[in-house]
Image (tube, rainbow, N blue to C red):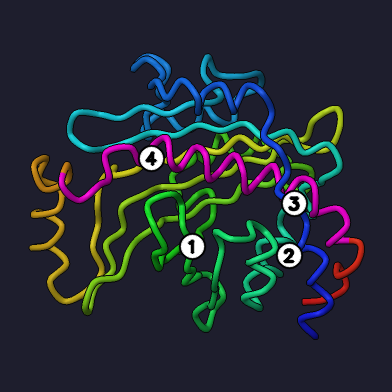
């Protein structure tokens, strides 16, 4: 596709954040510990209703961080969400229109299930590896998943990591639950940063033991990463909520 087909989206101003998200960023305060959804209790994300803190972040003394973000997407469907995650990875410019100025490049492995992206989440330009997986592989229980209609709702799950020579350090669990709402869907995003660091590569076990030490984890994970990730997530998905209906209408017949 000619780059000119996407130019109008690159030139669109970023969608303003709603006041509740701006207020969280201005205050810069962690939500209380009791507002954190632990990774082991992630099934609760699929419950009806809302959790006490649907927006915010929390930084732990050992370097870990937790992020929650709720995005209203009144003109978006679950089908559009599934389509978007396939479609945007085919060309760098498609990834760029999602968050102009912060998203730079994307490529995939042969299966399309692992994305290698270059973006800036607030700590500088970096290359990130995103390995997508099924909700069951992510750890949601079979019983809970059986209560969700995955044609009317979308669950996007992934392990996020960084490349070091010969290895990938998997440092974050990421989930986006696009739940059917009265108008469109509402996206409930969660990030568990520094939770159970894993490593792929020849020295995986040695490196994993080292990187899971608290002292190492505190040095490895940026101190304000929760706030940065909340800002990035809120902005990219509010902007996607604005552009996706038009992008889907224009390019929905493409791979």
Q: CA distance from mark 3 to mark 4?
A: 30 Å
- Which residue is located at x 27 percent, y 45 percent? 222
Magenta residue check for 221: yes
| Label 1 vs 3, first from the N-terminus | 3
Does residue 114 appear in this view?
A: no
Q: Is residue 88 left or right of residue 55?
A: right
Q: Position of residue 228 (x, y in %)?
A: 43, 41
- Residue 180's place in the image compared with 58, above or below, is below
Question: Which secondary structure lies at badge 3?
Answer: loop
Identify residue for label 2.
10
| Label 1 vs 2, first from the N-terminus | 2
Front tag of 1 and 3: 3
- Residue 43's place in the image compared with 212, above or below, is above
Q: CA distance from mark 1 to mark 3?
A: 18 Å
Q: Quadrant of the N terminus?
A: bottom right
Identify residue for label 3.
13
Q: Is residue 136 left or right of residue 198?
A: right
Identify residue for label 4.
192
Circles 1 and 2: CB atoms closer than 8 Å: no
Does residue 254 appear in this view?
A: yes
């Amino acid at each position: 596709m000619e780059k000119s087909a996407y130019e109008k989206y690159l030139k669109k101003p970023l969608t303003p954040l709603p006041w509740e998200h701006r207020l969280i960023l201005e205050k810069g305060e962690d939500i209380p510990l009791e507002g954190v959804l632990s990774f082991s209790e992630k099934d609760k994300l699929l419950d009806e209703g809302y959790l006490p803190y649907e927006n915010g972040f929390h930084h732990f003394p050992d370097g870990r961080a937790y992020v929650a973000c709720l995005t209203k997407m009144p003109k978006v469907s679950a089908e559009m969400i599934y389509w978007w995650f396939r479609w945007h990875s085919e060309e760098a410019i498609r990834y760029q229109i999602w968050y102009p100025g912060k998203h730079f490049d994307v490529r995939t492995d042969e299966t399309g299930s692992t994305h290698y992206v270059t973006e800036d989440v607030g700590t500088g330009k970096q290359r990130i590896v995103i390995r997508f997986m099924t909700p069951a592989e992510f750890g949601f229980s079979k019983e809970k998943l059986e209560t969700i209609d995955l044609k009317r709702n979308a669950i996007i799950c992934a392990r996020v990591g960084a490349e070091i020579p010969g290895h990938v350090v998997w440092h974050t669990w990421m989930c986006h639950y696009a739940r059917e709402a009265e108008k469109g869907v509402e996206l409930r995003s969660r990030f568990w940063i520094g939770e159970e660091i894993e490593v792929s590569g020849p020295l995986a076990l040695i490196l994993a033991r080292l990187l899971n030490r608290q002292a190492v984890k505190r040095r490895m994970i940026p101190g304000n990463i929760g706030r940065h990730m909340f800002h990035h997530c809120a902005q990219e998905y509010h902007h996607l909520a604005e552009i996706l209906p038009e992008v889907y209408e224009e390019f929905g017949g493409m791979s």
